Amino acid sequence: MRKKLWISLALAFVIPGLLFTASCAKKAVEPEPAVAEDDAAAKAAAEKAAAEEAARKAKMDATELFLYEEIYFEFDKSDLLPESQEVLRRKAEFLKDNPDLMVIIEGHCDERGTNEYNLALGDRRASSAKAFLVNLGIAGSRLTCISYGEERPSDPGHNEAAWAKNRRDHFTID
Amino acid sequence: MTGCRIKIIYLIAIAFFLIGSGLCRAEYDYIDITNPFLRKIPIAVPLFKKMSSGDATAQLSIKASDLLSETLEFTGYFKILDRGAFLADPQTDAVFSNINPQNWTSIGAELLITGGVLIEDNMVEMELRLYDTFKEQLLVGKKYTGGINDQRGMVRLFCSEVIYCLTGDRGIFNSKIAFVSTSSGNKEIYICDFDGYNPKRFTHAESIALTPAWSSDGKWLAYTSYEKGRPDLYIKHLKEKFGAVIAKNGINTTPAWVPGKFALAATLSFSGDQEIYLLTGTGKISKRLTYKWGIDLSPTWSPDSKQMAFVSKRSGTPQIYIKNIDSGLVKRLTFQGYYNTQPSWSPKGDILAYSAMEEGRSNIFLIGIGGEGPVQLTHNEGDNESPSWSPDGNLIVFSSTREGPSRIYVVTAYGTDKRRLLALKGEQTDPEWSPRIVD
């Protein structure tokens, strides 16, 4: 009889207690490792992509690298981001090492917005790069700007990842 | 003739209430599809009477009367009544004399068009008449003769007469629409009739062609093409194909012909900044029109050419501005949203159409030249861009991705009667309605 009472008491107090603990644990503790794992996975993926990118660039000679590296812009913007300025400094060095090369700077936009306006925006993006290179001592006569607006996307996708790739200056040797 | 006059006044009154007062009164009821004035005139177009025997005449009777119905319906003014409800049979009842008006008023027809077709020695004779059934009056009567392939032209001529009688305006039936299509794999300029009929390729550069613009006499087309690898501006005579090229450094684009003149405004960036210039029809710069650092482009002229609207990023986002050419004063027109481009000035002078991007989607809007409105014409149906007015200022042509690939659509200035104009292979963009073309 007494034993039964103890069991009942145990059930009455301990089990809800366990349940309570369990529910607390679920709410407070479990999601955190999940987020951390996602972060870690994204970070690892980004690091892997960056490493691959670096490895790809390391295999290129200077000319290939010059043609390969593009600079990217924010939506409806034509000012140069810090990383773009880094890329342009490398391009300026290359152009100083190869003083006979003439270059075409293509300005491009993502598909959002209207064709006419994007034609002007692409023009400004190409001009931004040209002005920066001229400030680094490259003769303006060696640099021709052509805006393609939204007419020649490099990624045909319709999402932010594609748009980010398409808002670019592409460099070719004339 | 008095019946006709009254009708003119009646229709002008409609047009006034729809376009004029909406803007004056308040911004919200500018377009109101429940507006009682937006009433279509019921018109009956029975099959044309066969005046000769044979299959060719029978076919012509059906084709020509259907074409006439479709052509009138295109204007958005009319409700074409179902032939199944007609009480009179034009093949047996009198067509041109002794029409019984009650046969038509009792089915609700306020206007009636009867016709007779005759084919003889491969020549077509088409006689067409417009009646006011309530006033029991003949309003227009015309007889046309021509080859069997001239039937479309005859029908359009008569429609033009009908619209002239009812509105005092010659209508749009001899206008055309230029647009860009990728049917061939490249962006080329095409030209079709006002109703999408007979699309023909105009450029063959196999590169990128953009932003076609008609001169106000309809004889010249200006456009941007990458024919030589860069965005240059081409000015071409439509028939003779001669013309000029403006190939300065940077972009040479968004031409807009000055009404009534052999001159155009266009955006050039050779100075390092995108500015609008006035050019002669032969491509020489005669005047600079904008002076602000930052993007200025897409000019469009008021019908009296005293003002020019354009897009500028001078305030940080692309917005529409109006410049008074004489005083040089510039005022900002659009304040709603962060991306307003592609202005198109109505031939009636009081409204601009433009495209606005909000939350990544483009839609067509109207705004009064005093800033009244704006009113949204397209909603939640893909991206809608490049509005351009019909020469009578009643319709707007635009491109839309509502069915997936970009196609060309027409809507009335009141936002009603949206329909696809044509569907070719590839995508169609950048439509530009011509002035009334005198061939």
Image: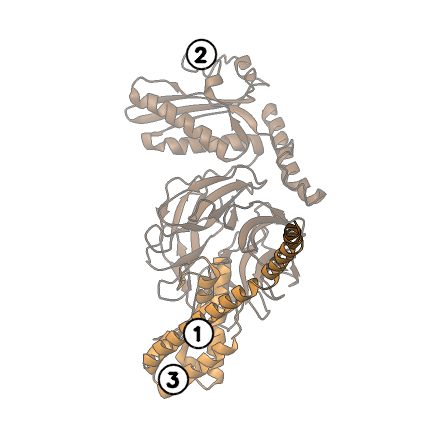
Left or right of residue A13: residue B258: left
Q: Nearer the viewer, mark 1 or mark 2?
A: 1
The residue identified by callout 3 is: A94
> Would you call the spot at circle 1 few (<14 residues within 10 Å), some (14-19), or many (20 or more)?
few
Colour applied to chain A: orange
The answer for how far apart the CA atoms under marks 1 and 3 are is 27 Å
**The C terminus of chain B is located in which quarter?**
top left
Chain designation of label 2: B
Marks 2,3: beta carbons within 8 A: no
Is disc 2 placed on a helix, strand or loop?
Answer: loop
**The N terminus of chain B is located in which quarter?**
top right
Chain designation of label 1: A
Q: Residue at x 56, y 65 (%)?
A: A32
The answer to whether residue B437 is visible is no
The answer for how far apart the CA atoms under marks 1 and 2 are is 86 Å
The residue identified by callout 1 is: A47
Left or right of residue A56: residue B320: right
* Front residue of this view, candidates A12 and B205: A12
The answer for how far apart the CA atoms under marks 2 and 3 are is 88 Å
Q: Nearer the viewer, mark 2 or mark 3?
A: 3
Provide residue B332's location: percent of width, then percent of height.
Answer: 65, 59
Q: Which mark identifies residue B93?
A: 2
Is disc 1 placed on a helix, strand or loop?
Answer: helix
Q: Are marks 1 and 3 on the same chain?
A: yes
Q: Residue at x 34, y 84 (%)?
A: A100
**Chain coloured brown in the rendered structure:** B
